Amino acid sequence: MRPLLLLAFLQLAASLAWAQDGAIKLAEGVFAIKGPGEAINTGFVVGDRGVFVYSCSLEDYDRRLQAIRSVAGGKPIRFVTNGHHAGDDSGCNHLLAEQGAFVVGSAELRRQLLPYWPKRMEEERKRGRVKREYVEGKSLDTALPVLTFDDRITLELGSHTVELIFVGRAHTPDNTIAYLRKERILFVNDLLFVELHPTADDRSDVVNWQRILRQLATWPVETVLPGHGAFAAGNGTKALLEMDRYFETMRIKIRAMKEAGKSLDEIKRDIRAELGEFARWPRERAIPSTAEQLHRELSTAR
C-alpha cells in the first residue's frame, strides 16, 4: 500500500474508532454513547438551552462526560434522567447534579431510588472500580429527582423538545422512555436488549413489557437507542419486535415444558436449547432469571 493511502487508511480507522468511543450522531443535536461490551448505552441531546442526558454508568463516567463535552460546544448539562433506577443507569445522577443539572424522573423512580441508591454507592465503594471521590461523602438528595412526574413531562431545550413518558412496570416498576417527536428518535433503556438475552425477575411484568414493545413499534420512529447492544442512526423499530418475539418464544417453550411435567429447575437448565435462533445470543447468564419470571407469570391467573 502506498504511503499516502496507508496514512489515509490509518486516519480513517482512527476516526471510526473515536466515533465508537465517543459521541455517535443520531440526528442534528442528538447523540449516543455506546457502552463498552454489553454495558448500558447513553443518549443525549445538545439543544440551544443546554444538554439533556439519558442514562449514565458511573464506572464509565469520565469517558461519557468527555464524549458529551466534545460536541456540547460549552453548553451545560441541564437535565439528566434515568430509564429506571439501576446503578448502571442512575449512577451519575449525583455528579451531574453537582454540576448544576436537574435530575428529572417519575415518582416511581424516586420511590425505587430511595432505598436502592445508598446501597449501590456502598457496593461501588467496596468494589473499588470507580474513583473514591465519586462515591464517598455523597448525598442521596443529589441523586433523587428534583422534578418529578406521574405520566409524562416535556423538557424544552430550545432547538429540541424531549418528552419523558413513564410506561410503568416492565423490566422494573419504574421504566421511562425519552421521545424526540420531531427527530423521530426513542431512547428506551432496558426495555430493549439488542441480540442479548434480557433480564426479567420478580420485579418485572413481561406481559406488559411485550405490550409496550408492540405499541412503541407502531410509533413514527426512525431510530431507537437500546439500553444494551448495537444501534445505528435509522435502525428503525425492528429490534423492538424482535424483543417481543424473544419473550413470546420463551413463553411458548416454557408452557410446553411445564405441561410436560418438567420442574422449574429443569426448565431453567434446559430452556436455552429450546430458544432456536435466540440461543446463540450472548448474556446467557440472564436466561434462568427470565425463565423463572415467565414461569411465575404463567402460573398466575392474569
Image (cartoon, rainbow, N blue to C red):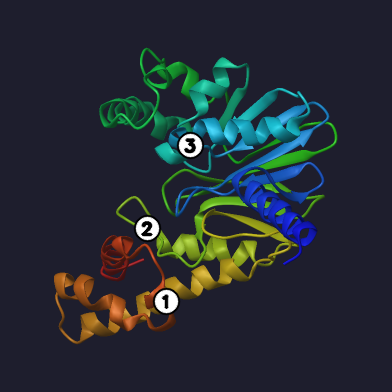
Q: Earlier in the sequence, mark 3 or mark 2?
A: 3
Q: Give the percent coordinates (x, y) of residue 112.
A: 40, 35
Q: Which residue is located at x 40 percent, y 57 percent? A: 205
Near mark 1 (Cα within 10 A), the count class, few <14, some 14-19 or many ≥20, is some
Q: Is residue 260 visible?
A: yes
Near mark 3 (Cα within 10 A), the count class, few <14, some 14-19 or many ≥20, is some
Q: Is residue 124 above or below residue 195?
A: above
Q: Give the percent coordinates (x, y) of residue 157.
A: 78, 31
Q: Quadrant of residue 248?
A: bottom left
Residue 199, numbered label: 2
Q: Is 224 on the left-hand or right-hand side of 4? A: left
| Mark 3: amino acid | Asp
Q: Which residue is located at x 72 percent, y 59 percent? A: 6
Q: Are marks 3 and 2 in contact (CB under 8 Å)?
A: no
Q: Which residue is mark 1?
A: 278
Q: Earlier in the sequence, mark 1 or mark 2?
A: 2
| Mark 2: amino acid | Thr
126 or 204: nearer the eye? 126
195 or 150: nearer the eye? 195
Q: Earlier in the sequence, mark 3 or mark 1?
A: 3
Q: Residue furthest top?
A: 137
Q: Are marks 3 and 1 in contact (CB under 8 Å)?
A: no
User: What is the distance, in whole Å, between disc 3 and disc 2 at their CAs?
Assistant: 21 Å
Q: Is 40 on the left-hand or right-hand side of 177? A: left
Q: Which residue is located at x 71 percent, y 33 percent? A: 70
Near mark 2 (Cα within 10 A), the count class, few <14, some 14-19 or many ≥20, is many
Q: Is 2 on the left-hand or right-hand side of 117? A: right
